[in-house]
Image: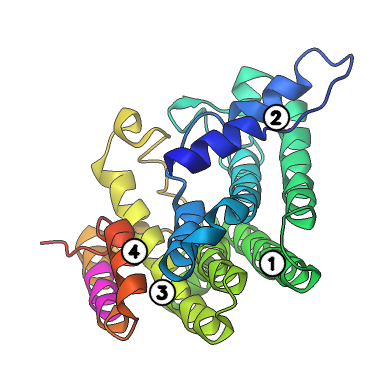
Amino acid sequence: MQKFEQFLTEHLPVSKSIHPHYESALHNMLLAGGKRFRPALLLGVVKAYNPLMLESAYHAAYAIELLHTYSLIHDDLPAMDDSPLRRGHPTLHMTYDEVTAILVGDALNTYAFEVLSNAPFSDYTRVSLIRDLATNGGLNGMVLGQAIDCHFENHPLALEDIKTLHTNKTAKLIAASMKMGATIVGEEQVAEKLYTFGIDLGVLFQIQDDILDVTQSSEEAGKLTNNDENKNSFVTILGLERAMQEANELSDKLLNEMQSFDEKLKNELFELLVKYINRHK
């Protein structure tokens, strides 16, 4: 991931103009760090099957991080979560202004697909990757999840509806990251299996994040915590103990599914996922 971080730094969006801070704002949240969980998943799958393709795969991993970063910038806007902190730094609308944050989010969203369209793959692979990122990050994926989340604030949902919300908002982009890694190395049968696995992983990732929201300080988490009381988080609706139980059940399911993976893939993923797939006591 150090090499990916270097790749990201060397391929930051370029936009020279008379605007006093547009370009620096484009870089701001990309350089603020973060887990890089989605790029790591894609690169882990590629490394398991064909390490020689890792350098090319950085382009696709970067596209995913661009799209994810745009979603965080918009999620933090006053019209949505109105959050002052992200990745341990002031959010973009706090550093600059709301207009800048909206436009930078728009720019990073579209730039993700520009990066993918220029990635060093065959036309067939490029189109497949663009389709997967758009399908899972767009109107019937991440954006739909965000729409449901915002609309039903202060209106508690049933557990199945909460799972639908977070499957769209969080899990689909995580699942797409794994599927895109398999597509890059030509493992199309594995791609579908990893997508299904990734959906469960994404829901678990969200449950763990909701648990951290009530057990960590804002300084520890790098973002505003204890701020989900009006939202349909797993902890808000189920309570902490039941949310931990849901996380444990999903962890067991995922560990069991990983046993059917080939050894190289299992080893790559286990090292990456061990901190997410863990049991709460």
Q: Is residue 60 magenta?
A: no
Q: Secondary structure at mark 2?
A: helix
Q: Nearer the viewer, mark 2 or mark 1?
A: 1
Residue 195 screen position, x and y as percent: 51, 77
Of residue 97 and residue 13, the one placed in the foreground of this image is 13
Residue, disc 2: 26
Residue 257 screen position, x and y as percent: 31, 83
CA neighbours of label 3 inside 10 A, class few (<14), some (14 to 19), many (20+): many
What number is the disc on residue 129? 1
What number is the disc on residue 200? 3
Question: What residue is at 79 percent from the left and 56 percent from the top?
Answer: 117
Q: Amino acid at mark 3?
A: Asp
Mark 2 vs mark 3, CA separation in Å: 32 Å
Q: Amino acid at mark 4?
A: Glu
- Left or right, 271 with respect to 2, comes to left
Residue 66 screen position, x and y as percent: 64, 45
Tell me which corner region of the image, top left, top right, bottom left or bottom right, holds residue 165: bottom right
- Quadrant where the C terminus sits is bottom left
Question: What residue is at 48 percent from the left and 80 percent from the top?
Answer: 196
**Bounds of the magenta span?**
247-255
User: Which of the marked residues, 4 or 2, is nearer the chain's N terminus?
Assistant: 2
Tell me which corner region of the image, top left, top right, bottom left or bottom right, holds residue 129: bottom right
Q: Amino acid at mark 2?
A: Leu
CA neighbours of label 1 inside 10 A, class few (<14), some (14 to 19), many (20+): many
Q: Nearer the viewer, mark 4 or mark 2?
A: 4
Question: What residue is at 17 percent from the left and 65 percent from the top?
Answer: 279
- Quadrant where the N terminus sits is top left
Q: Secondary structure at mark 1?
A: helix
- Left or right, 245 with respect to 120, comes to left
Mark 4 vs mark 1, CA separation in Å: 21 Å
CA neighbours of label 4 inside 10 A, class few (<14), some (14 to 19), many (20+): some
